[in-house]
Image (spheres, rainbow, N blue to C red):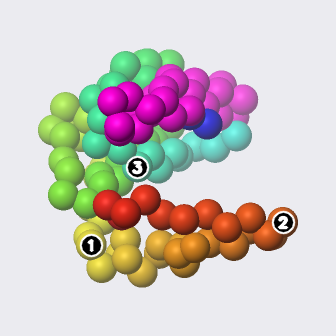
């Protein structure tokens, strides 16, 4: 969905929040689901949640907060929240390197 841009030796995400917000609204408008579970701790998602709740008051949005993150403002617009703990994250990580179906090897960045 998003793109990454190298900014001074670090990667910065571009357009991902907007793409997620658009997809959330698209899914509700097209009646593809009644409930969305979004993993984010970013307040950039608040306008999408506010708009979704105004346009689709019967639809449900749940937030999963990433490890060691919580955002009260985001939680206020959700129907419920969950936390992910470190053990769960480790359990569901891909192997390093991850080998794709076409043989491409993808390596995790060192900090991960």
Residue to which mark 2 is pinned: 102
What residue sits 35% from the left and 38% below the top?
10
Q: Nearer the viewer, mark 3 or mark 2?
A: 2
Q: What stretch is highlighted in magenta?
A: 3-31
* Position of residue 80 measured from the top left corner of the image (x, y, whole percent): 31, 50
Residue to which mark 3 is pinned: 39
Q: Which of marks 1 and 3 is in front?
A: 1
Left or right, 22 with reference to 87: right
Q: Can residue 46 be seen in this view?
A: yes
What residue sits 20% from the left and 51% below the top?
69
Q: Which of marks 2 and 1 is in front?
A: 2
Q: How busy is the neighbourhood of tag 1: few (under 14 within 10 Å), some, or many (20 plus)?
A: few
* Position of residue 14 measured from the top left corner of the image (x, y, whole percent): 48, 27
* Position of residue 29 measured from the top left corner of the image (x, y, whole percent): 65, 25
Please say whether residue 46 is one of the residues in the magenta stretch: no
Q: Can residue 56 be seen in this view?
A: no
Query: Foreground residue, 72 or 69?
Result: 69
């Amino acid at each position: 969905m998003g793109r990454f841009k190298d900014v001074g030796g670090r990667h910065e995400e571009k357009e991902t929040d907007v793409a997620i917000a658009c997809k959330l609204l698209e899914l509700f408008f097209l009646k593809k689901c009644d409930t969305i579970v979004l993993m984010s701790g970013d307040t950039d998602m608040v306008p999408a949640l506010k708009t979704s709740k105004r346009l689709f008051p019967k639809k449900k949005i749940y937030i999963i907060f990433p490890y060691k993150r919580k955002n009260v403002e985001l939680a206020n617009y959700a129907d419920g929240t969950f936390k992910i703990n470190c053990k769960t994250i480790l359990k569901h990580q891909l192997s390093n390197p991850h080998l794709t179906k076409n043989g491409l090897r993808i390596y995790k960045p060192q900090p991960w």
